[in-house]
Image: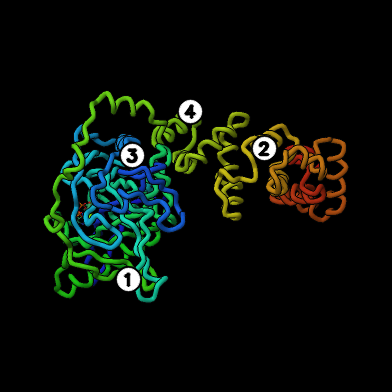
Amino acid sequence: MDEVSKKKEYLIDRNGKKYEVVIGLEVHAQVLSESKLFSTSPTKFGAEANTQVSLVDAAFPGMLPVINEFCIKQAIKTGIGLNAKINNKSIFDRKNYFYADLPQGYQISQYKDPIVGEGSVVLDLTSGSKTVGIERLHLEQDAGKSIHDIDPKNTLVDLNRSGVALMEIVSKPDLRSPEEVNAYVKKLRSIMRYLGTCDGNMQEGSLRADVNVSVRKQGEDKYGTRCEIKNVNSIKFMQMAIVHEANRQVDILEEGGKIDQETRLFDTKKNETRSMRSKEDAHDYRYFPDPDLLPLEFDNAYVEKIRKEIPELPDEKKSRFIEKFNLSSYEANILVSDLDTSKYFEEVIKNSDVKNSANWITGELFALLNDKNLEITESPISAKNLSNLINLIKDGTISGKIAKTVFELMSDGDKNPIDVVREKGLEQESNPKELEKLIEKVISENQDKVKEYKSGKEKLFGFFVGQAMKVSGGKANPQLVNEILKKKLK
Ligand code: ADP
Ligand code: MG
């Protein structure tokens, strides 16, 4: 990165004045769990409507919630992954509001005493790293889903999602640009995927966020009034919503107006935010401890036992890759950001050299996966065969250039590269006699160039190498070609 882009801040310029954008995220992450937070109903995505609903989820009278210990463990794990304080005592409250998709008439959530307190997340930005504060993580139940577009007269309701465990992860207002929001959400997702606590699937709604945005004049200490954009379910939309909302606020301020704290919706089609309701305060929800649930208490030993199950997380893996394998911070970031990619990489380097493995994975393999829209777990080329290919270059069986052709041929059914090479006759030509013949041909066919070269136009050397490679169909050993050419052109 050059110095200019390194220092670039995200500011909005208006009438010669510069505004800074301040962002805080409330991320709702669905706990990866087979059953719901307070019932044994399954949580599978995409099931037929109302087939995963127990009497508890449908809030039949007299039903009592029973806490799912697995979800508690998942929240503690996530808290540990966020370097956060785990609270030995937390309380489930009733948050009272009414929607058709919330049959209880209240949501069981945590308010003053969440299960996880302050923590932090490190972002890897192009300008370097930045630490973002975490305010809290609390557990709550998801609501069902109202469906307005099936029946022309009535709203239908699907309660499959009702009662599914969510972790709400609240950041401090530490984010300053759409780029930082992108890095933040990706980092959270990466940490949770490593931990196995949330699948992070945004298309399926497993990860979505309320985006709080305010603006202030550059250099000002006090935060401006924020607006909260509800329930945004893709990083791209979060970024678009922020740009739009920040500009809207700047326009109001520049016209001498004042920002009303409110809840807004992002219209992805019109690319604008719209007022939904004025901001509700906590007292509007009449929070009180849910009398059906005891305070949640556990001791340090319980937390320490869970801590032992925590795998190596992205930041640690990155440090290890840099120290042990001598990778750049940039390469390490790419390789660790997704757990499966890091596994693939570690598999490849069991048999081949680290630098080449990193290059092939982040270069050719990523391009191929991108092109075919595949995850690395679905890679048409196995780690074993990629390392075989890398080794064929290393031992001189094929040239780096031919390797790209072989790679392409391999992608059609995970073929062993040596079979492809033999089948297509792509072995590198390293026989000096053969190469000499070939080079003599190139020389005799280009006498005029030889003259020029000999009279001092040394740049032409590359031309001869190129011709020799071309005549050999890319198979000549480039190093030998160089050596022989040097001798012949003396
Ligand atoms: P609420 O439930 O009222 O939305 P929370 O405490 O759950 O309150 O979340 C508030 C969110 O708003 C946090 O992510 C916080 O970082 C963010 N936030 C607070 N003040 C500002 C501000 N002035 N500008 C932008 N974001 C803010
Ligand atoms: Mg909020």
In this view, which residue lies farthest toward the left?
283
Q: Which numbered dot is residue 385?
A: 2
Badge 1: few (under 14), some or many (20 or more) residues near its Cα, within 10 Å?
A: some
Tag 4 or tag 3, which sits nearer the N-term? 3
Mark 1 or 2, nearer chain start:
1
Task: In this rendered view, identify the residue nearer to me: 110 or 328.
Answer: 110
Mark 1 lies within 8 Å of ligand 1 (Cβ measured) = no
Q: Is mark 2 within 8 Å of ligand 1?
A: no
* Disc with the residue nearer the chain's start (4 vs 2): 4
The amino acid type, in three-letter code, at marker 3 is: Cys
Q: CA distance from mark 3 to mark 4?
A: 35 Å
In the rendered image, which residue does mark 4 sit on? 324
Discs 1/3, front = 3
Image coords of residue 431 (percent x, y): 83, 35
Q: Of discs 4 and 1, which sits in the foreground?
A: 1
Which amino acid, by three-letter code, is at mark 2? Asn
Mark 1–mark 3 distance (CA, rounded to whole Å): 36 Å
**Mark 2 crowd level (few <14, some 14–19, many ≥20, 10 Å Cα):** some
Q: Earlier in the sequence, mark 3 or mark 2?
A: 3
Labels 3, 2: front one: 3
For label 1, the residue is 272
Residue 209 point in image, percent of width and height: 32, 55
How far apart are the two marked residues, 3 and 2, measured between alpha carbons?
A: 39 Å
Task: Name the residue carrying label 3.
Answer: 71
